[in-house]
Amino acid sequence: MTGEPGRVRFRPTFWATVAVVPALILLLGLGGWQVQRMQWKQDLIADMRARMDGPAIELPGPGAAWKTVRFRRVELTGEFLHDRALHRLAQTHRGARGFDLITPMRLSDGRTVLVDRGWLPIRMREDGGVPERVRVDGPVTIEGIVRRGGWPGASWLRPANDPAGNEWLWMDLPRMAQQAGLSDPVTHLYVESVAPAASGRFPIAERPRVTLPQNHLGYAITWFGLAAGLLAIYVIFHCRREPSGEPQT
C-alpha cells in the first residue's frame, strides 16, 4: 500500500516574490486611496448641501475667493434687463425639450450678474427677448445659488456656442456678458434662481442638484479584489505537497 498523503508546505520563490510584493502593495494602495477619495467626496457633498440650505447672504464682492461662495445661497436685489436675455439651449424638464432663460440683473450696487431664471418650453423661445408673460418689471428681490460658468469637460469636447443666434450650450460668462452689452458685469459666477413659480407658471426654477460622480466604492472594491486574487494565486502557486514517509505495506 502507498503511504499517507504528504503535508502541504508553502515555499515561496525569490523572483515570484520580488514581482508580486510591489504589485500587491500598489493594488492595496490604490484601494486605500479610493476609500479616502470616497470620504472626501461625501464630505464635499455634505458641505455643498449645507451651503445651499443655509441662510441667504448678499452676493460677495469681486475680491471674494470662489471657494467661499460656491453653492452659497445668496439674495439679489435689482432689476432684470429683459431685452438682453440669453437662451441656454438643450435643457429638458420631465422629458420635455426647452431652454433655460438667462436674464441679466442690474444690482442695487451697480454690478450686473447673469441669473438663470429657470426652464421654458421650446415653443416660448423668442429671438432676442423674453415672452411678455414671464417678465418681471421693476425692482425685485430673489434668492439663488451661486454657480460657476465654463465647460466641465475637456476643451476639445466643448460644443460651440452661437452668440449671434443667441444659442448657448454652456455658460461662457465673459462672452455672454459681452454679447449682452453689460456694464460692470460679474463674470466669474452666475446665480441659479430657486424662486418657485406659481402652479402652471413659467419659468420653472428647480432646486439645483448636487451631481458629483461617486464611483469610488466600486473602484476600491475592484482594487482590493485584484489584490486578493493576486495573493491567492501567489499562495496557490507556491504550495507544494511533499511526499510522505515510507510506504505502508
Image: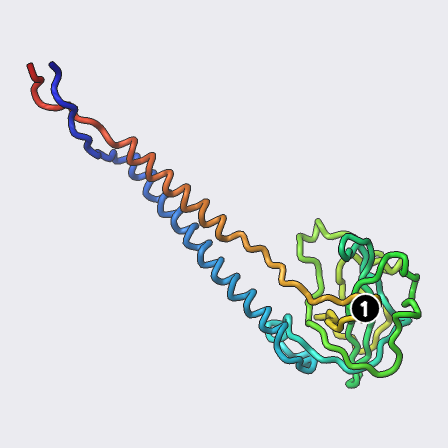
| Residue plotted at (60% across, 58% down) | 212
Which residue, as the protein is rendered here, is positioned at the far bottom? 109
| Residue plotted at (22% across, 28% down) | 240
**Residue type at the position of mark 1:** Ser
On-image quarter of the C terminus: top left
Q: Residues within 10 Å of mark 1 (few under 14, many from 20)?
A: few
| Above or below 6: residue 249 | above
Q: Is residue 156 left or right of residue 200?
A: left
Residue 13: x and y in percent read: 25, 33
When asked about the image quadrant of residue 241, the answer is: top left
| Residue plotted at (40% across, 46% down) | 224
Q: What scheme was used to colour the molecule?
A: rainbow
Mark 1: which secondary structure?
A: loop
Residue highlighted by disc 1: 199
Residue 61: x and y in percent read: 69, 81
On-image quarter of the N terminus: top left
When asked about the image quadrant of residue 55, the answer is: bottom right
| Above or below 8: residue 200 | below
| Residue plotted at (83% across, 62% down) | 120
Q: Nearer the viewer, residue 164 or 103?
A: 103
Q: Is residue 66 left or right of residue 137?
A: left
Q: How many labels were placed on the picture?
A: 1
Residue 158: x and y in percent read: 73, 52
Q: Nearer the viewer, residue 163 or 84?
A: 84
Q: Nearer the viewer, residue 108 or 47?
A: 47
Q: Nearer the viewer, residue 200 or 217?
A: 200
Q: Is residue 131 left or right of residue 72?
A: right
Residue 222: x and y in percent read: 46, 45
